[in-house]
Image (tube, rainbow, N blue to C red):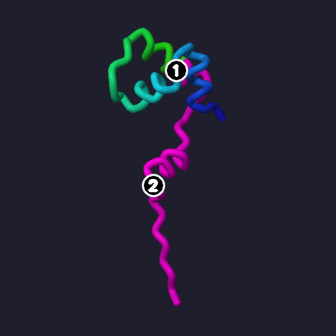
Amino acid sequence: MATIRDVAQKAGVGVATVSRVLSENGYVKEETKQKVMEAIRELNYTPNEIARNLYYKRTGIVAVIIP
């Protein structure tokens, strides 16, 4: 399973740049964006939902306790 670091290394950019491309937040040159997207496709990268949820302190899990 590829990580954001793997994508950054393959594209020759920093992790922050990959993050900006994925979140569409902040300016990234079109040429750089294309390199990152190509690396994402080649590595079959998918964001880790568990890590994202831990970062944002949310899980989407509801616990029901029945006595």
- Above or below residue 30? Residue 6 is below
Image location (x, y in percent) of residue 66 = 51, 86
Query: Which residue is most to the top?
Result: 31
- Type of amino acid under label 2: Lys
- Residue for point 50% across, 14% down: 35
Image location (x, y in percent) of residue 49 = 52, 46
- State yes or no: residue 62 in magenta: yes
Image location (x, y in percent) of residue 53 = 48, 50
Query: Which residue is most to the right?
Result: 1
- Above or below residue 14? Residue 67 is below
Question: Camera-side residue: 38 or 33?
Answer: 33
Q: Which mark is residue 57?
A: 2
Q: Which mark is residue 14?
A: 1
Q: Is the N terminus in the top left, top right, bottom left or bottom right quadrant?
A: top right
Q: Which mark is residue 34?
A: none
- Type of amino acid under label 1: Gly
- Above or below residue 39? Residue 55 is below
- State yes or no: residue 18 in magenta: no
Mark 2 vs mark 1: which is more N-terminal?
1
- Residue for point 52% across, 16% down: 13
Query: Which residue is most to the left?
Result: 26
**For this view, does 26 lie left or right of residue 61?**
left
The answer to which image quadrant residue 5 occupies is top right
The answer to which image quadrant residue 23 occupies is top left
Helix or strand or loop: what does disc 2 sit on?
loop
- Residue for point 56% across, 30% down: 4
The magenta stretch spans which residues? 39-67
**For this view, does 27 lie left or right of residue 58?**
left
- Above or below residue 50? Residue 11 is above
**Could you give the CA–CA distance between mark 2 and mark 1, rounded to whole angstroms?**
25 Å
Q: Residues within 10 Å of mark 2 (few under 14, many from 20)?
A: few
